[in-house]
Image (spheres, rainbow, N blue to C red):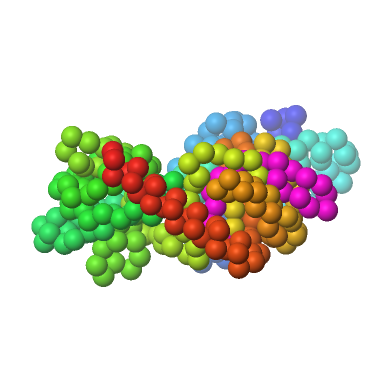
Amino acid sequence: MGKILSEKFISEYKEKFTETFVEQSKKLSRCILSENAVRTLAINIYDTIFILNSKEKFHKLLKKALESNVDFSECLTKSMMILIKDYVDHLITISPSIDELKRLIEHVESYLVEATRVQREYIEALRKESEKAGEKAVKKTFMNVFSLIKEKQIPVKAITFFKQVPVACNATVVQTEESGITLSLENCSYLKAFYESKITYLKISNAPKPVKAEVIEFHPERKQIKISNLSFEEIPQEKRKYVRVEPEESFSVVVESERGKLTGIVADISIGGIGVLFHVNPELLPGNKVKVSFPLDGKRMIVDGEVRYITEQDKLYRMGIQFHLKPKEEEAISEYIMRRQFEILKELKAF
């Protein structure tokens, strides 16, 4: 270490560093170590940084301290700053050298950076561990709830969406296990909707919110689905004013604004508006006024609208447009929506 500090300074300053470190630790009410333990820790830190110059051992030393609920980063930083100041005074009395001071500062900085990195990694590990523990607790709670539902035979309403049309069926809990919860949809006429959906919602009496669940298995022969990854969440579609439907066949939609015309493909449609998919960013803003042109029941509809949002969806851009309809336009779209809903439900029943 002679290249960083003089051997004489290293030897003589160890006690001063130790006393400074102990003094700084006393100012921290959160320090749980005895004075002797802090003194030993300071000596180990000093030797690791200035004699052994081992980042690996320094890393292990910090990690072990953190695992024992001892965070000495603030003590270390202040003690190192005092050491640098004292070394400046030392250099002035012998032979002032900017290069030597620079080497010391770079050396100290590298260890303080390492200390920050170790602390950050430890905090991140604690966060992940806490999240994992929280997830386990939530999972256990849901397992207990559904075990009780199974035991008491409490009715559950399963809800999903098929081509944007809401579908609801009564369900019963037939099995609860670590890997998931199995629901029976024995009397459901719309099984296809649940088999093709990745997400289903469950409404349970007295529950604060619907339960969102991921469908991980489906068994048509038993009319059962298996769900997992449960959480309490509102059903987004229920916040909508109008029911959306997906057309039986895709059709082109022309959106005209002050910037010109854009052609996209319909995603879904309701009395309130239309979702349009584009391969390129339309580069319009929410609030922009547009005219929307699309075919409907053999006629060409041209209606006024307003851009509500643009989001990325499966490598495409989805534009949500709110309609400003005249009475006859609303009547025509309403009739189409109603008929399309019945077509979708009929398709489900034919499964």
Q: Is residue 152 left or right of residue 263?
A: left
Q: Residue furthest front?
A: 298
- The count of marks equals 0
Q: Residue at x 61, y 48 (%)?
A: 299
Which image quadrant: the N terminus? Answer: top right
Q: Residue at x 22, y 36 (%)?
A: 220
Pick the residue in front: 140 or 205. 205
Q: Residue furthest left?
A: 151
Whether residue 82 can be seen here: no
Q: Residue at x 18, y 50 (%)?
A: 187
Pick the residue in front: 165 or 350. 350
Pick the residue in front: 337 or 31. 337
Q: Residue at x 75, y 29 (%)?
A: 3
Pick the residue in front: 68 or 129. 129
Is 332 drawn above or below residue 121 in the view shown?
A: below
Q: Position of residue 49 (x, y in %)?
A: 62, 37
Residue 83 belongs to magenta span: no
Whether residue 328 can be seen here: yes
**Magenta: main secondary structure:** strand
Q: Position of residue 313 (x, y in %)?
A: 58, 42
Residue 269 belongs to magenta span: yes
Instruction: State the image quarter where residue 170 is shown.
Output: bottom left
Q: Position of residue 67 (x, y in %)?
A: 43, 47
Is 162 drawn above or below residue 55 in the view shown?
A: below
Which image quadrant: the C terminus? Answer: top left
Q: Position of residue 89 (x, y in %)?
A: 82, 50
Range of magenta residues: 254-272
